[in-house]
Every structure is written in structure tokens, then in C-alpha cells.
Amino acid sequence: MSKINKFAKRTVAIALAGAFAFAMTGCGASDAKPAEATSTETSSSEEASSEVTSSVASSSEAEVSTEDKATKTDAVSGKETEITLVLDWTPNTNHTGFYVAQSEGYYEQAGLKVNIVQPPEDGATTMVASGQAQFGIDFQDYLAPVYTSKDEIPVEAVATIIQHNTSGIISLKEDGIDSPKGLEGKNYATWDLPVEKAMMQNIVEADGGDFSKVNMIPEYVENEPAALQADIDAIWVYYAWAGISCKQAGLDTNMIYFKDITPEFDFYSPVIIANSDWAKQNPDTAKAFLEATKKGYEFAINDPDKAAEILCEQVPELDKNLVKESQEWLSPQYKAEVEQWGYIDQARWDAFYKWLRDNNLSDEIPAGYGFTNEYLPE
């Protein structure tokens, strides 16, 4: 599934607020003057963020307070503490660690009963901010409007699921798009948002290309292999799902990764978010959840085949062949070169938000704001 599909369906109030809703689906399935479009988009972002804030503030306080009392009661009685985790989209290999932790009893061993749910129409972040879920899945790029809201929204990233940004532009090898400049004269499926277009302009021009020569085609991509064999030459996707899907369809493709062109685009995607008020009041429970989750992801790193089997057992509607090959590709990416699962590097986190600000695509986000490694297991 492409990023454009995810954005079209995920009508998150915060994401709709601005031009930031440009991250691809967790399953990875998807102009020349961004500054001129910025003032209107930023203003809209601030207004919508304020609406979200007002809608979640009171319920967040009540939910967190109630949850804190429930947690303390459960600790005394020996009952499992109930946790709700809301996904960003339908289950896929980005989420394998959660399902492994569930199946292998890691959550139960930690004294937790974890309910994994799919997001409502207004998205995972809104659900977490309102206190209806303690944890959720989102993307660093989606979170920018949250962190520039006039009112503080109680959401922060507490771990990354994948250590590096594995998104990029996929195309058929026969079309010869082996670098961003090769997009000149080609049809690119766009959802026509300022941040997306600014990033595309950046990588094309960094490669010596003329961005005005890229054909930006608004298209709702449901099926990447079919689209690439029809009127679309290039799509923004995560390789682990859409790339593997194209491979299994027998297509020979090129993949241009954003992080390989512009270092600032190596942002964290996806991340685990938490209701920050709840986490501060329940740090031991937050740590226990992440410890058990870490075990699930490290299981998947060490045994991708078994992890894929577990995911398919837990979510039987998934394509087993796609899951198996996707898992084999993605498992090494969970930690990549770092020792600590889930670790977020502040320099990389800040670099992306600084790029947004420098290009008039966002208000300033303070250094180190919006994430914490405090609850990560060693």
C-alpha cells in the first residue's frame, strides 16, 4: 500500500491540519515554490491543532487520572494492568514485535494485558492524546503539527520501530529512473501537499535535475504493481511492503531511498508514541511495556521466519508469502547498527524538524522536543 492511500483514508485531525501528512503507510505498502504555500498551510495547521487540543485536553486529564488509579489497584491485587495499543493502519510487518510479544507471553509475564486495536478515523495520535490508548504508532513527520500546537498535546515518541527511514521512490527498472534526476518527464503519483513536493524538489535538484519537468499526477494508488504497469512511473512507498509486493508480482524495480539523497530525510518512521501524562504517572508500566515489546522485536530479528508465522497466525487474513519475504527484509532494519532497540538519536530527530523550519514548512520545534529514550530498556 502506498503512502498516498494511507493519507487519503487516515483523516487524522492533526494531520489534516497541515501539510505534514506525508508519511507512508506503516505497511509501506506509498513544487517549485513550497514557501509560498506555507503561510496558509501553517495557519491551518495551528487552527486545527488547537481544535484537537481543546477536544482532547479535558478527556486526557480524566483518562490519565483514572488509568493511574487502576494501575495502582492492579499492582496491589496482582491483576494484569490493561494497556491499549492503537496501530497506525492494518497489521503488517512493522508491527510484528507486538504480535510476537503477545503470542509468546512477554506481555503477560510483565503483568500486562495488551489490547492491540486498529485506529479510528481520526487516527492513533488523537486516540493516544485523549487518553483512550496509552500507546500508539505514528510517524515523526506526522507529529510536527502536534509539537507546534499553541497548546501542549500530551503525546511523545518513546521508541522507534525501524532505525532508519526505509521509504523512497519505486519505479520499473525499464523506465530508467535510477536517480532522482531520472524523474524528469516521468509520471509521479502525488497527493499534492507542500511538504511532499518540497522533499521531491529537494532530491531531484540535489541530483542536478529540473523539478518542473516531473509530471505530478494526483492518483489514489491502491495497488503498486498495477499502477506501475499502467499510467504511473514512480510512487513513494516503503520497500518492506510495497517493494516486496512488486517483486512478488514479478516486476524488476529501482528504489531510490530518501535518506541516501538528503541526510535530513532519515527521519524516524514509524515510532511508538505514548500519552506523556500517563507515562509520567506510570513510568514502571511504560517501561514494562517497552521491555516486553523489545523482546518481541528481538525475537523477530533473530528468527524472521518464525516471527512471520506468528504474525500470520495472529492476523490470518495477511498474505503469508508477502509477510514471510517482507519479514526477512525488514527484521535487520529494526535495530540496524544500534545496540539499544528503539533508540532515537536527537541529532537525527532535530535535523528533520530543522529542515521543515528552514524551508518554511513548520514553526520551530525546540531541540530534543517530542521524544524521550527514558522508558527504553537497556
Image: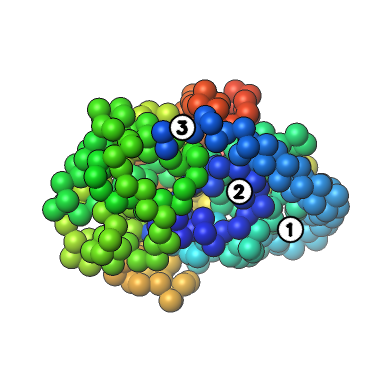
Inspect the image, locate mark 3, and give the three-letter code of the amino acid beneath it.
Lys
What is the distance, in whole Å, between disc 3 and disc 2 at their CAs? 21 Å
Residue for badge 2? 15
| Vertical side of 378 occupied by 223: above or below | below
Q: Residue furthest bottom?
A: 317
Residue for badge 3? 33
Q: Quadrant of the N terminus?
A: bottom left
What residue lies at 74% left-to-right and 48% top-to-bottom?
52
Residue for badge 1? 132
Q: Nearer the viewer, mark 3 or mark 2?
A: 3
Q: Nearer the viewer, residue 60 or 315?
A: 60
Q: Callout 1: few (<14), some (14-19), or many (20+) C-alpha neighbours within 10 Å?
A: many
Q: Is residue 236 visible?
A: no
User: Going by the image, does 4 lie left or right of 148?
Assistant: left
Labelled pair 2, 1 in contact (Cβ < 8 Å): no
Q: Earlier in the sequence, mark 2 or mark 1?
A: 2
